[in-house]
Image (cartoon, grey):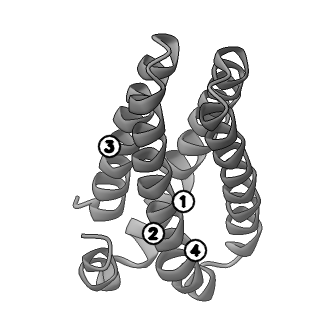
Amino acid sequence: MSQPFVTTLTADHRRCDQLFVQVETAAQSADWTLAASAVEAFCNATDRHFQFEEDMLFPPLEEVMPGATGPTAVMRQEHQLIRQLMGDLRAAVDAQDGDESLGVISTLHMVLQQHNIKEEGVLYPAADRDLADQAERLLASLA
């Protein structure tokens, strides 16, 4: 059985995770120039992923799946929390504050892991089940 949403969006999570590791590595070594560019790359990729979900995935899922608005509302709230943490991370890296940077990284890591598990285990399989006829069109906007 084809799972284009699970496959594509999970791969995008892993891509964002790899960028996040670069942030953590640069912050641990106090390479603030590299950390700043890594933070921007991570934040841009993550925000692009969130925008896809909020604009392209959640609305049609809410239309066809009874009760989808509950889980998607939670995901939107978590997106806002993660965006706030990304702002905190930018500020900590800009200030070249190692302790604060690593603290925000730790919190962000935990929140992202929990968030991704929910999406990959619940929302993406639901999208594959209920939006299969729209998958190619919707996912094309993420490419």
- In the rendered structure, are the residues bearing label 2 and label 1 in contact, judged by CB atoms less than 8 Å apart? yes
For image coordinates 55% across by 39% down, the residue present is: 117
> Are there few (<14), some (14-19), or many (20+) residues within 10 Å of tag 1?
many
- How many marks can you see? 4
**The C terminus is located in which quarter?**
bottom left
**Three-letter residue code for mark 4:** Glu
Residue 87 at x, y percent in the picture? 68, 49
Marks 1 and 4, how far apart in space?
A: 12 Å
Estimate the spatial distance between the alpha carbons at disc 3 and disc 1, rounded to whole Å: 19 Å
Question: In the image, which disc is placed on residue 127?
Answer: 2
Checking the image for residue 15, the label placed there is 3
Category of crowding for the residue at label 4, using alpha-carbon neighbours closer than 10 angstroms: few (below 14), some (14–19), many (at least 20): some
Q: Residues within 10 Å of mark 3 (few under 14, many from 20)?
A: some
In the picture, measured across the screen, residue 3 lies left or right of residue 44, that is left
Dot 4 falls on a residue whose secondary structure is helix
Residue picked out by circle 1: 123
**Position of residue 32 measured from the top left corner of the image (x, y, whole percent):** 48, 26
Task: Give the mark nearer the N terminus: 3 vs 1.
Answer: 3
Seen at 46% across and 72% down, the residue is 52
Q: Is residue 36 above or below residue 79?
A: above
Q: Earlier in the sequence, mark 1 or mark 4?
A: 4
CB-based contact (under 8 Å), mark 1 and mark 4: no
Single out the residue that lies furthest toward the top.
29
Residue 54 has which mark? 4
Q: CA distance from mark 4 to mark 3?
A: 19 Å
Q: Compare marks 4 and 3 and give the one earlier in the sequence.
A: 3
